[in-house]
């Protein structure tokens, strides 16, 4: 009996819930384990299947490429989302991954709703589920960030909703999906649930029990405007005026609370999981990323955020049990990237780390171009650790493109704190690299990427001296959680290496539907084989 035949009708989960935690390193599971309750992350690990060696297999490890890769089952080489923003060589301007001037905002008069998935190449597993069910299976995507909602839902989502803070504090969408907000969204916005979270943020537990973090008052954290030191407590009502009004919620755990509130409202409002076909709900928790960027991965603020997120996961699972029935849904949790320790903190521990002055680097490369080629016009743009050359300017100046590239390659490789450099001809060639080269190649898009790509040394960041960031090829950015839980999922774990692109084909295999059209990942057979042995499904 084939795979698709065994999962027809009632054997399919009523609802697939795909959760992405923004900027979650894998080791947060073990770091905070003793502080977690029994019904959140511990329930997923103890009663689900945990892929303990799951990695991103491309560069850069950023939010937009991460979400696109999870749901399409392929890398930026194919789906084309090479960054949150990137340089559009044809138009000579930077573009935003989901920005779309052809659509209108819905739910606000501001431009924050002018978004769509039009730059995403290929389908997501949610698209394939919609197509397979003749558009009867529904897809709803939710996040504070627009890109965290839009990219997971793909091209056929019934709705994607994201948060607009400022002086409004509402969830919005775009005319790509619909012309007006549905009643349940209006009801949620009108309830002003958002206002209940503009309160004081203090530690959930006593601060001195947060032994997995460094001291609260330290020089490695950023903070909020209007507060002298980044230490608990934070009076959000008092601080909101200098910190974007409702936007401040995104920088606190209450942003995740609000996201879950809205996700549960979406299940109710759209009757997800109750129409006889598998529906898909994607939820991206963004506040962990914002808190990590501000306070750093070793901060008490981040520890508090994960203890509170643990409660969110518990509440989510309890709701799904009551709404749909225990194990009548499929729940998947992963992250869009990890995050690095604050380099200044690592340096205090005598660990090699530091900062890269990108502005100085750009200036120096232009000066080298002027000296070497008697013109600076050949440098079109430097962004996302890529150098874009003006091919027409090179031709007009009488220089040979390949010679220019080789010269810049050698110069950039010798630049302090640069570890590796790759050229377009290398990355678009037939040679399959290993290690960092492989990650660079799988993140290289023929039309959208530059002529040279450089990689910094480990723990070297182009960032401010407080807070954490991400984007590297190193384990702290590539190693993220991946846990499956729910209908048909066996209890277990594996250290066999898996990749983020394996998620989409695995979910499609469980549903018995076609893989996303550009998917390059492999179904996760360490789990699927156990499901087969339990006669939940049979391998084809």
Image (tube, rainbow, N blue to C red):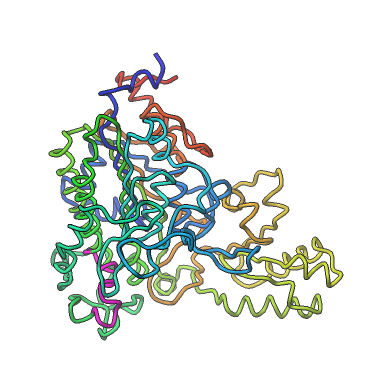
Residue 109 location, x and y as percent?
34, 69
Image vertical order of residue 278 relative to residue 412, above or below: above
The segment highlighted magenta reads: 240-254
Q: Is residue 402 magenta?
A: no
Image vertical order of residue 395 relative to residue 516, above or below: below
Residue at 23 percent of width and 44 percent of height: 270
Question: Quick one: 532 or 92, which is closer to the camera?
Answer: 92
On screen, residue 104 versus residue 318, left or right, reads right
Question: Quick one: 25 or 162, which is closer to the camera?
Answer: 162
Quarter where residue 82 is shown: bottom right
Image vertical order of residue 256 relative to residue 13, above or below: below
Residue 399 location, x and y as percent?
84, 68
Residue 364 location, x and y as percent?
67, 79
Q: Is residue 246 magenta?
A: yes
Question: Quick one: 179 or 342, which is closer to the camera?
Answer: 179
In the rendered view of the protein, which quadrant contains the N terminus? top left
On the question of residue 476 being in view, the answer is no
Residue 315 location, x and y as percent?
16, 49
On the question of residue 457 being in view, the answer is yes
Magenta-highlighted stretch: main secondary structure? helix
On screen, residue 206 versus residue 44, left or right, reads left
Residue at 27 percent of width and 24 percent of height: 11
Residue at 29 percent of width and 78 percent of height: 243
Which residue is most to the right?
A: 398
Quarter where residue 28 is shown: bottom left
């Amino acid at each position: 009996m084939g795979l698709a035949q065994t999962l027809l009708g009632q054997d399919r989960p009523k609802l697939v819930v795909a959760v992405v935690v923004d900027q979650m390193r894998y080791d947060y599971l073990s770091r905070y384990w003793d502080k977690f309750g029994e019904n959140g992350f511990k329930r997923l690990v103890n009663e689900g299947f945990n892929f303990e060696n799951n990695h991103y297999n491309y560069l850069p490890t950023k939010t937009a490429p991460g979400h696109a890769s999870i749901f399409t089952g392929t890398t930026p080489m194919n789906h084309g989302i090479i960054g949150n923003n990137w340089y559009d060589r044809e138009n000579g301007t930077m573009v935003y991954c989901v920005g779309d001037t052809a659509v209108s905002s819905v739910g606000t008069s501001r431009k924050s709703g002018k978004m769509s998935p039009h730059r995403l190449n290929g389908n997501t597993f949610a698209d394939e589920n919609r197509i397979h069910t003749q558009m009867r299976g529904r897809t709803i995507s939710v996040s504070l960030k627009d890109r965290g909602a839009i990219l997971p839902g793909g091209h056929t989502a019934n709705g994607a909703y994201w948060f607009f803070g400022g002086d409004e504090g509402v969830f919005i969408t775009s005319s790509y999906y619909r012309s007006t907000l549905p009643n349940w969204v209006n009801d949620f916005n009108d309830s002003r649930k958002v206002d209940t979270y503009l309160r004081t943020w203090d530690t959930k537990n006593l601060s001195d029990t947060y032994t997995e973090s460094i001291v609260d008052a330290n020089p490695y954290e950023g903070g909020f405007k209007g507060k002298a030191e980044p230490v608990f407590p934070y009076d959000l009502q008092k601080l909101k005026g200098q910190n974007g009004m409702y936007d401040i919620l995104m920088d606190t755990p209450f942003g995740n609370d609000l996201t879950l509130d809205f996700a549960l409202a979406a299940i109710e409002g759209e009757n997800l999981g109750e129409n006889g076909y598998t529906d898909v709900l994607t939820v991206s928790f963004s506040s962990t990323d914002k808190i990590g960027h501000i306070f750093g991965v070793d901060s008490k603020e981040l520890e508090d955020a994960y203890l509170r997120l643990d409660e969110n996961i518990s509440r989510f699972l309890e709701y799904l049990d009551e709404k749909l029935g225990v194990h009548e849904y499929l729940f998947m949790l992963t992250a869009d990237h990890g995050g690095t320790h604050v380099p200044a903190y690592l340096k205090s521990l005598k660990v090699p780390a530091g900062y890269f002055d990108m502005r100085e680097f750009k200036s120096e490369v232009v000066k080298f171009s002027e000296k070497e080629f008697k013109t600076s016009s050949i440098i079109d743009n430097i962004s996302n650790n890529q150098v874009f050359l003006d091919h027409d300017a090179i031709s007009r100046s009488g220089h040979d493109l390949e010679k220019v590239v080789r010269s810049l390659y050698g110069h950039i490789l010798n630049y302090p704190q640069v570890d590796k450099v790759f050229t377009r001809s290398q990355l678009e060639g037939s040679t399959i690299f290993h290690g960092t080269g492989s990650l660079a190649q799988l993140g290289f898009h023929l039309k959208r990427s530059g002529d040279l790509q450089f990689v910094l040394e480990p723990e070297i960041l182009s960032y401010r001296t407080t807070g954490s960031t991400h984007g590297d090829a190193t384990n702290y950015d590539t190693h993220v959680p991946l846990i499956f839980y729910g209908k048909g999922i066996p209890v277990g774990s594996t250290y066999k290496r898996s990749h983020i692109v394996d998620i989409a084909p695995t979910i499609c295999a469980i549903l018995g539907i076609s893989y996303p059209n550009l998917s390059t990942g492999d179904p996760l057979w360490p789990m699927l084989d156990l499901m087969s042995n339990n006669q939940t499904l049979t391998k084809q």
